[in-house]
């Protein structure tokens, strides 16, 4: 387990050294790899198998509840909430205190999408549609099937 202050300093250093777009790409790759680690080492194989067999309407809420129970391990002092089609984080570690034209929660977006596509439905996509770095009141990650029309990324999202 890494102290959230160290993770936060790492994110700040990445943004300072490489700029926001490159840091965003690296954090997205890190989020996907973190999800791979969690999936392989923290979710029992029986649970992985059951989630994959169940239809989306049952497996998605089960997985989202499990993610919620372990939120303290990845959002630190932030607060995560979820509904079927969205995950929100207040006090997101990669976004709070930054100013950006684009959402900066690539780490979380990639981690959530990796878990959902591997354990629930490979067509699911996650997109951060609201972000405190852009001036929104919280970071919101919308969950949709890839063949659905995209969600708007304005503040009405
Ligand atoms: Zn954000």
Image (cartoon, rainbow, N blue to C red):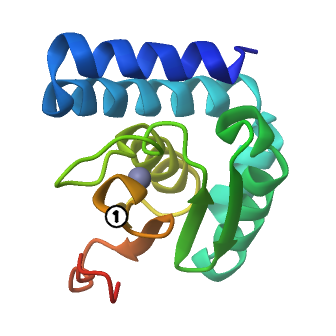
Q: Quadrant of the N terminus?
A: top right
**x, y percent for residue 33:** 46, 24
Q: Quadrant of the C terminus?
A: bottom left
**x, y percent for residue 101:** 16, 54
**x, y percent for residue 139:** 47, 61
Q: Write down the residue under mark 1.
A: 135
User: Does residue 118 appear to the left or right of 81 in the view shown?
Assistant: left
Residue occupying the point 64% across, 19% down: 5
**x, y percent for residue 72:** 79, 40
Q: Nearer the viewer, residue 49 or 150?
A: 150
Q: Crowding near pointer 1: few (<14 within 10 Å), some, many (20+)?
A: some
In the rendered image, which quarter is residue 46 located in?
top right
The residue at label 1 has a CB less than 8 Å from ligand 1: no
Q: Is residue 78 above or below residue 144?
A: above
Residue occupying the point 48% across, 70% down: 137
Q: Is residue 34 above or below residue 151?
A: above
Residue occupying the point 72% across, 51% down: 67
Total of numbered circles in the picture?
Answer: 1
| Residue 54 appears in view | no
């Amino acid at each position: 387990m890494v102290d959230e202050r160290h993770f936060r300093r790492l994110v700040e250093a990445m943004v300072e050294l490489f700029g926001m777009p490159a840091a965003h790409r690296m954090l997205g790759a890190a989020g996907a790899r973190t999800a791979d680690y969690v999936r392989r080492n923290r979710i029992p194989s029986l649970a992985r198998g059951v989630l994959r067999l169940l239809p989306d309407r049952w497996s998605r809420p089960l997985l989202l509840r499990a993610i919620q129970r372990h939120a303290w391990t990845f959002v630190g002092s932030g607060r995560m909430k979820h509904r079927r089609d969205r995950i929100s984080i207040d006090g997101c570690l990669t976004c709070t205190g930054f100013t950006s034209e684009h959402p900066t929660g690539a780490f979380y977006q990639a981690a959530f999408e990796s878990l959902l596509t591997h354990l629930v439905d490979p067509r699911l996509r996650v997109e951060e549609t609201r972000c405190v770095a852009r001036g929104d009141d919280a970071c919101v990650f919308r969950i949709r099937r890839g063949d659905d029309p995209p969600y708007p990324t304005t503040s009405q999202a």
